[in-house]
Image (cartoon, rainbow, N blue to C red):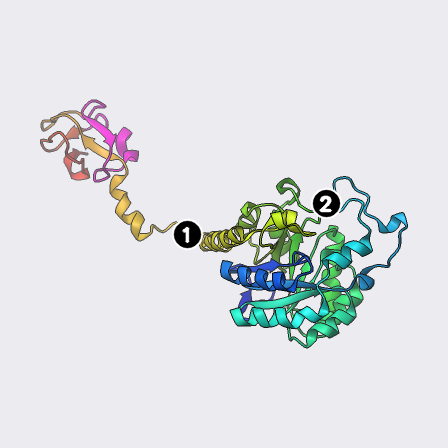
Amino acid sequence: MKPFYIGQYSIAPGEAPFIIAELSGNHNQSLERALNLVDLAAAAGAHAVKLQTYTPESITIDCDSTDFVIQDPKSLWNGRKLYDLYREAATPYEWHQAIFERCARHGVLCFSTPFDEAAVDFLEQFDPPCYKIASFENNHYPLIRKASRTGKPLVISLGLCSEQDVIDLKSYLDSLGVEKYVFLKCTSTYPASPEATNLVTIPFLREKLRVNVGLSDHTLGIGVSVAGVALGAQVIEKHFTDSRSNGGVDSAFSMEPEELKALVVETQRAWQALGKVSFELTEGEQKSLQFKRSIYVVEEIEVGAVFTESNIRVIRPGRGLDPRCFDSILGKRAKVPLKRGQALKQDMIIE
Protein backbone atom coordinates (compact mmCIF):
# COMPACT_ATOMS: atom_id res chain seq x y z
CA MET A 1 0.00 0.00 0.00
CA LYS A 2 1.28 3.45 -0.86
CA PRO A 3 0.64 6.51 1.30
CA PHE A 4 -0.88 9.55 -0.39
CA TYR A 5 -2.47 12.86 0.48
CA ILE A 6 -6.02 14.14 0.24
CA GLY A 7 -5.39 17.85 0.50
CA GLN A 8 -3.09 18.25 3.49
CA TYR A 9 -4.13 14.97 5.10
CA SER A 10 -1.93 11.90 4.82
CA ILE A 11 -3.74 8.63 4.11
CA ALA A 12 -1.43 5.90 5.34
CA PRO A 13 -1.19 3.28 8.07
CA GLY A 14 -0.39 4.94 11.38
CA GLU A 15 -1.74 8.35 10.40
CA ALA A 16 -4.65 10.07 12.15
CA PRO A 17 -8.08 9.22 10.70
CA PHE A 18 -9.53 11.47 7.99
CA ILE A 19 -13.15 12.37 8.86
CA ILE A 20 -15.67 13.05 6.08
CA ALA A 21 -19.11 14.58 6.66
CA GLU A 22 -21.42 13.36 3.89
CA LEU A 23 -24.16 15.90 3.09
CA SER A 24 -25.95 13.70 0.57
CA GLY A 25 -29.56 14.85 0.21
CA ASN A 26 -29.89 16.34 3.69
CA HIS A 27 -30.04 19.85 2.25
CA ASN A 28 -33.75 19.21 1.57
CA GLN A 29 -33.47 21.27 -1.61
CA SER A 30 -32.40 24.40 0.27
CA LEU A 31 -29.06 25.99 -0.56
CA GLU A 32 -29.23 27.97 2.66
CA ARG A 33 -29.52 24.74 4.61
CA ALA A 34 -26.69 23.14 2.62
CA LEU A 35 -24.41 26.05 3.47
CA ASN A 36 -25.45 25.88 7.11
CA LEU A 37 -24.56 22.18 7.13
CA VAL A 38 -21.09 23.11 5.90
CA ASP A 39 -20.77 25.63 8.75
CA LEU A 40 -21.86 23.04 11.30
CA ALA A 41 -19.57 20.33 9.94
CA ALA A 42 -16.61 22.70 10.05
CA ALA A 43 -17.43 23.75 13.62
CA ALA A 44 -17.61 20.08 14.64
CA GLY A 45 -14.10 19.47 13.30
CA ALA A 46 -14.76 17.47 10.14
CA HIS A 47 -11.80 17.42 7.77
CA ALA A 48 -13.93 17.30 4.64
CA VAL A 49 -17.48 17.79 3.42
CA LYS A 50 -18.70 15.54 0.64
CA LEU A 51 -21.46 16.11 -1.88
CA GLN A 52 -23.16 13.88 -4.42
CA THR A 53 -23.18 15.08 -8.02
CA TYR A 54 -25.85 13.70 -10.33
CA THR A 55 -29.19 14.37 -11.91
CA PRO A 56 -32.03 11.85 -11.72
CA GLU A 57 -31.66 11.35 -15.48
CA SER A 58 -28.00 10.41 -15.08
CA ILE A 59 -28.90 7.53 -12.74
CA THR A 60 -32.23 6.19 -13.96
CA ILE A 61 -35.29 6.97 -16.08
CA ASP A 62 -38.68 8.33 -15.12
CA CYS A 63 -40.68 5.11 -15.30
CA ASP A 64 -43.60 3.75 -13.28
CA SER A 65 -42.87 0.08 -13.85
CA THR A 66 -42.22 -2.01 -10.72
CA ASP A 67 -38.54 -2.30 -11.62
CA PHE A 68 -38.21 1.42 -10.89
CA VAL A 69 -40.10 1.46 -7.57
CA ILE A 70 -38.53 0.48 -4.23
CA GLN A 71 -40.47 -2.47 -2.86
CA ASP A 72 -39.00 -3.31 0.51
CA PRO A 73 -41.08 -2.82 3.68
CA LYS A 74 -37.88 -2.43 5.70
CA SER A 75 -36.51 0.35 3.49
CA LEU A 76 -36.70 4.01 4.50
CA TRP A 77 -37.82 4.65 0.94
CA ASN A 78 -40.35 1.84 0.47
CA GLY A 79 -42.82 2.68 -2.28
CA ARG A 80 -40.77 5.56 -3.66
CA LYS A 81 -40.10 5.74 -7.39
CA LEU A 82 -36.35 5.86 -8.03
CA TYR A 83 -36.60 8.91 -10.26
CA ASP A 84 -38.55 10.89 -7.68
CA LEU A 85 -36.20 9.89 -4.86
CA TYR A 86 -33.11 10.94 -6.81
CA ARG A 87 -34.76 14.19 -7.87
CA GLU A 88 -35.44 15.02 -4.21
CA ALA A 89 -31.94 14.08 -3.03
CA ALA A 90 -29.89 15.59 -5.89
CA THR A 91 -27.68 18.57 -5.16
CA PRO A 92 -28.36 21.10 -7.94
CA TYR A 93 -25.30 21.71 -10.10
CA GLU A 94 -25.67 25.47 -9.69
CA TRP A 95 -25.13 25.13 -5.92
CA HIS A 96 -21.73 23.50 -6.17
CA GLN A 97 -19.66 26.63 -6.46
CA ALA A 98 -21.24 28.23 -3.39
CA ILE A 99 -20.71 25.06 -1.35
CA PHE A 100 -17.08 24.66 -2.46
CA GLU A 101 -16.45 28.32 -1.61
CA ARG A 102 -18.07 28.00 1.82
CA CYS A 103 -15.88 24.99 2.59
CA ALA A 104 -12.78 26.88 1.48
CA ARG A 105 -13.72 29.78 3.77
CA HIS A 106 -13.65 27.35 6.71
CA GLY A 107 -10.47 25.60 5.60
CA VAL A 108 -12.44 22.38 5.14
CA LEU A 109 -11.87 20.19 2.09
CA CYS A 110 -14.77 19.71 -0.30
CA PHE A 111 -15.22 16.94 -2.84
CA SER A 112 -18.03 14.90 -4.32
CA THR A 113 -19.28 11.58 -5.57
CA PRO A 114 -19.83 11.78 -9.33
CA PHE A 115 -22.37 9.28 -10.61
CA ASP A 116 -21.52 9.52 -14.30
CA GLU A 117 -18.62 10.62 -16.47
CA ALA A 118 -20.16 14.03 -17.24
CA ALA A 119 -20.26 14.77 -13.51
CA VAL A 120 -16.49 14.27 -13.35
CA ASP A 121 -16.02 16.85 -16.12
CA PHE A 122 -18.30 19.25 -14.25
CA LEU A 123 -16.50 18.81 -10.92
CA GLU A 124 -13.03 19.33 -12.36
CA GLN A 125 -13.63 23.09 -12.53
CA PHE A 126 -13.58 23.12 -8.71
CA ASP A 127 -10.31 21.16 -8.51
CA PRO A 128 -11.50 18.75 -5.79
CA PRO A 129 -8.76 16.99 -3.82
CA CYS A 130 -10.18 13.54 -4.64
CA TYR A 131 -13.20 11.69 -5.99
CA LYS A 132 -15.52 9.34 -4.15
CA ILE A 133 -16.91 6.26 -5.88
CA ALA A 134 -20.14 5.11 -4.25
CA SER A 135 -20.91 1.49 -3.37
CA PHE A 136 -23.60 1.32 -6.02
CA GLU A 137 -21.06 2.48 -8.63
CA ASN A 138 -18.03 0.37 -7.65
CA ASN A 139 -18.60 -1.88 -10.69
CA HIS A 140 -19.03 1.12 -13.01
CA TYR A 141 -15.58 0.74 -14.50
CA PRO A 142 -16.04 3.48 -17.15
CA LEU A 143 -16.78 5.96 -14.35
CA ILE A 144 -13.81 4.76 -12.29
CA ARG A 145 -11.56 5.07 -15.34
CA LYS A 146 -12.81 8.60 -16.00
CA ALA A 147 -12.23 9.71 -12.41
CA SER A 148 -8.79 8.07 -12.29
CA ARG A 149 -7.65 9.96 -15.39
CA THR A 150 -7.92 13.23 -13.46
CA GLY A 151 -4.94 12.08 -11.41
CA LYS A 152 -6.90 12.69 -8.20
CA PRO A 153 -7.00 10.07 -5.42
CA LEU A 154 -10.05 7.80 -5.29
CA VAL A 155 -12.09 6.95 -2.21
CA ILE A 156 -14.07 3.81 -3.10
CA SER A 157 -16.84 2.25 -1.00
CA LEU A 158 -17.04 -1.53 -1.11
CA GLY A 159 -20.71 -1.99 -0.26
CA LEU A 160 -22.39 -4.83 -2.19
CA CYS A 161 -19.00 -6.33 -3.14
CA SER A 162 -18.05 -9.96 -2.80
CA GLU A 163 -14.43 -10.76 -1.98
CA GLN A 164 -13.86 -11.57 -5.66
CA ASP A 165 -15.43 -8.24 -6.65
CA VAL A 166 -12.90 -6.44 -4.46
CA ILE A 167 -10.01 -8.45 -5.90
CA ASP A 168 -11.23 -7.69 -9.43
CA LEU A 169 -11.58 -4.00 -8.60
CA LYS A 170 -8.03 -3.84 -7.27
CA SER A 171 -6.78 -5.58 -10.41
CA TYR A 172 -8.63 -3.05 -12.53
CA LEU A 173 -7.11 -0.14 -10.61
CA ASP A 174 -3.69 -1.74 -11.01
CA SER A 175 -4.26 -2.03 -14.78
CA LEU A 176 -5.03 1.69 -14.88
CA GLY A 177 -1.88 2.47 -12.93
CA VAL A 178 -3.89 3.95 -10.05
CA GLU A 179 -1.86 4.02 -6.84
CA LYS A 180 -3.63 6.69 -4.77
CA TYR A 181 -6.82 5.14 -3.47
CA VAL A 182 -8.49 3.90 -0.31
CA PHE A 183 -11.15 1.20 -0.02
CA LEU A 184 -13.95 1.86 2.48
CA LYS A 185 -15.57 -1.11 4.20
CA CYS A 186 -19.28 -0.43 3.82
CA THR A 187 -22.57 -2.12 4.63
CA SER A 188 -25.12 -0.78 2.16
CA THR A 189 -28.22 -0.82 4.33
CA TYR A 190 -29.71 2.37 5.71
CA PRO A 191 -29.29 2.40 8.62
CA ALA A 192 -26.86 -0.49 9.04
CA SER A 193 -26.76 -2.55 12.21
CA PRO A 194 -23.51 -3.03 14.15
CA GLU A 195 -23.97 -6.80 13.82
CA ALA A 196 -23.91 -6.52 10.03
CA THR A 197 -20.86 -4.27 9.89
CA ASN A 198 -18.12 -6.94 10.26
CA LEU A 199 -15.29 -4.54 11.01
CA VAL A 200 -12.64 -7.28 11.11
CA THR A 201 -12.82 -7.08 7.32
CA ILE A 202 -10.74 -3.88 7.63
CA PRO A 203 -7.47 -5.54 8.74
CA PHE A 204 -8.23 -8.49 6.45
CA LEU A 205 -8.35 -6.19 3.40
CA ARG A 206 -5.24 -4.34 4.46
CA GLU A 207 -3.22 -7.50 5.03
CA LYS A 208 -4.48 -9.55 2.08
CA LEU A 209 -4.62 -6.87 -0.60
CA ARG A 210 -2.05 -4.44 0.81
CA VAL A 211 -4.37 -1.48 0.35
CA ASN A 212 -5.31 1.58 2.38
CA VAL A 213 -8.62 0.94 4.13
CA GLY A 214 -11.32 3.03 5.80
CA LEU A 215 -14.98 2.81 6.78
CA SER A 216 -18.17 4.23 5.31
CA ASP A 217 -20.40 3.93 8.36
CA HIS A 218 -24.20 3.89 8.14
CA THR A 219 -24.80 2.77 11.73
CA LEU A 220 -26.23 5.05 14.39
CA GLY A 221 -23.88 6.65 16.93
CA ILE A 222 -20.09 6.71 16.93
CA GLY A 223 -19.13 3.37 18.50
CA VAL A 224 -18.69 1.49 15.24
CA SER A 225 -16.50 4.21 13.74
CA VAL A 226 -14.30 4.36 16.85
CA ALA A 227 -13.89 0.59 16.70
CA GLY A 228 -13.08 0.91 12.99
CA VAL A 229 -10.20 3.26 13.76
CA ALA A 230 -8.96 0.83 16.42
CA LEU A 231 -8.88 -1.84 13.70
CA GLY A 232 -6.91 0.38 11.31
CA ALA A 233 -9.48 2.47 9.42
CA GLN A 234 -7.67 5.47 7.94
CA VAL A 235 -10.81 7.23 6.66
CA ILE A 236 -14.22 7.55 8.31
CA GLU A 237 -17.25 8.71 6.33
CA LYS A 238 -20.58 9.45 8.04
CA HIS A 239 -23.77 11.09 6.76
CA PHE A 240 -24.42 14.43 8.43
CA THR A 241 -27.45 16.63 9.14
CA ASP A 242 -28.32 19.55 11.38
CA SER A 243 -31.15 17.61 13.05
CA ARG A 244 -32.74 14.27 12.27
CA SER A 245 -36.08 15.78 13.22
CA ASN A 246 -35.89 18.09 10.19
CA GLY A 247 -36.31 15.11 7.88
CA GLY A 248 -34.62 14.47 4.58
CA VAL A 249 -33.94 11.38 2.54
CA ASP A 250 -30.91 10.35 4.63
CA SER A 251 -31.68 12.04 7.95
CA ALA A 252 -32.68 8.86 9.81
CA PHE A 253 -29.11 7.49 9.77
CA SER A 254 -27.21 10.80 9.75
CA MET A 255 -25.15 12.31 12.55
CA GLU A 256 -26.10 15.56 14.24
CA PRO A 257 -23.47 18.24 15.06
CA GLU A 258 -22.72 17.12 18.61
CA GLU A 259 -22.35 13.53 17.45
CA LEU A 260 -19.97 14.57 14.69
CA LYS A 261 -17.92 16.56 17.19
CA ALA A 262 -17.76 13.50 19.45
CA LEU A 263 -16.77 11.35 16.47
CA VAL A 264 -13.85 13.64 15.64
CA VAL A 265 -12.66 13.67 19.26
CA GLU A 266 -13.11 9.98 20.01
CA THR A 267 -11.63 8.64 16.78
CA GLN A 268 -8.60 10.86 17.45
CA ARG A 269 -8.33 9.35 20.93
CA ALA A 270 -8.69 5.83 19.56
CA TRP A 271 -5.92 6.51 17.05
CA GLN A 272 -3.66 8.03 19.71
CA ALA A 273 -4.23 5.02 21.94
CA LEU A 274 -3.05 2.56 19.28
CA GLY A 275 0.58 3.59 19.70
CA LYS A 276 3.08 0.81 19.17
CA VAL A 277 3.87 -2.60 20.60
CA SER A 278 5.54 -1.68 23.87
CA PHE A 279 6.03 -3.03 27.37
CA GLU A 280 8.08 -0.08 28.56
CA LEU A 281 6.71 1.64 31.63
CA THR A 282 5.60 5.22 31.14
CA GLU A 283 6.83 7.91 33.50
CA GLY A 284 3.50 7.75 35.29
CA GLU A 285 3.73 3.98 35.64
CA GLN A 286 7.24 4.23 37.06
CA LYS A 287 5.78 6.26 39.92
CA SER A 288 3.03 3.69 40.41
CA LEU A 289 5.48 0.80 40.90
CA GLN A 290 5.63 1.64 44.61
CA PHE A 291 1.99 0.59 44.92
CA LYS A 292 2.52 -2.96 43.70
CA ARG A 293 2.79 -5.67 46.33
CA SER A 294 6.04 -6.87 47.82
CA ILE A 295 7.21 -8.91 50.81
CA TYR A 296 7.10 -7.20 54.23
CA VAL A 297 7.84 -8.26 57.76
CA VAL A 298 4.58 -8.25 59.76
CA GLU A 299 5.89 -9.53 63.12
CA GLU A 300 9.12 -8.89 65.04
CA ILE A 301 11.74 -11.42 63.87
CA GLU A 302 14.91 -12.26 65.80
CA VAL A 303 18.23 -13.21 64.23
CA GLY A 304 18.08 -16.84 63.11
CA ALA A 305 14.28 -17.05 63.28
CA VAL A 306 12.51 -18.91 60.50
CA PHE A 307 10.43 -17.01 57.95
CA THR A 308 6.82 -18.21 58.01
CA GLU A 309 3.49 -17.22 56.53
CA SER A 310 2.76 -15.57 59.87
CA ASN A 311 5.74 -13.24 60.10
CA ILE A 312 6.07 -12.18 56.44
CA ARG A 313 3.31 -11.29 53.99
CA VAL A 314 2.77 -10.06 50.47
CA ILE A 315 1.31 -6.58 50.89
CA ARG A 316 1.51 -3.07 49.50
CA PRO A 317 3.69 -1.01 48.99
CA GLY A 318 6.28 -2.36 46.61
CA ARG A 319 9.58 -1.61 48.31
CA GLY A 320 10.39 -5.14 49.40
CA LEU A 321 11.29 -8.34 47.56
CA ASP A 322 9.15 -9.41 44.63
CA PRO A 323 6.17 -11.60 45.69
CA ARG A 324 7.36 -14.27 43.26
CA CYS A 325 10.14 -15.01 45.82
CA PHE A 326 7.70 -15.67 48.68
CA ASP A 327 7.56 -19.46 48.54
CA SER A 328 11.35 -19.76 48.24
CA ILE A 329 11.88 -17.59 51.33
CA LEU A 330 9.62 -19.61 53.60
CA GLY A 331 11.74 -21.86 55.87
CA LYS A 332 14.85 -19.75 55.51
CA ARG A 333 16.25 -17.78 58.47
CA ALA A 334 16.74 -14.11 59.23
CA LYS A 335 20.31 -12.79 59.05
CA VAL A 336 19.47 -9.66 61.10
CA PRO A 337 16.72 -8.65 63.54
CA LEU A 338 13.65 -7.33 61.71
CA LYS A 339 10.85 -5.04 62.80
CA ARG A 340 7.18 -5.12 61.90
CA GLY A 341 6.57 -3.00 58.77
CA GLN A 342 10.10 -3.45 57.43
CA ALA A 343 10.52 -4.20 53.73
CA LEU A 344 12.27 -7.54 53.36
CA LYS A 345 15.48 -7.39 51.31
CA GLN A 346 17.74 -10.13 49.99
CA ASP A 347 20.65 -9.26 52.33
CA MET A 348 18.39 -9.89 55.34
CA ILE A 349 18.12 -13.60 54.54
CA ILE A 350 20.57 -16.38 55.33
CA GLU A 351 21.05 -18.31 52.10
Q: Position of residue 157 (x, y in %)?
A: 68, 57
Q: Secondary structure at mark 2?
A: loop
Q: Residue at x 62, y 46 (%)?
A: 219
Residue 92: x %, y % from top left:
72, 66
**Marks 2 and 1 in Cβ contact (< 8 Å):** no
Pick out the residue farthest to the right: 65
Q: Callout 1: helix, strand or loop? A: loop
Query: Residue 2: x, y in percent?
Result: 60, 67
Residue sitting at 57 percent across and 68 percent down? 109
Crowding near pointer 1: few (<14 within 10 Å), some, many (20+)?
few
Residue 278's label in the rendered image is 1
- Identify residue type, mark 2: Leu
Q: Which residue is mark 2?
A: 76
Q: Is residue 315 above or below residue 227?
A: above
Q: Is 348 within the magenta?
A: no
What span is in magenta? 307-332
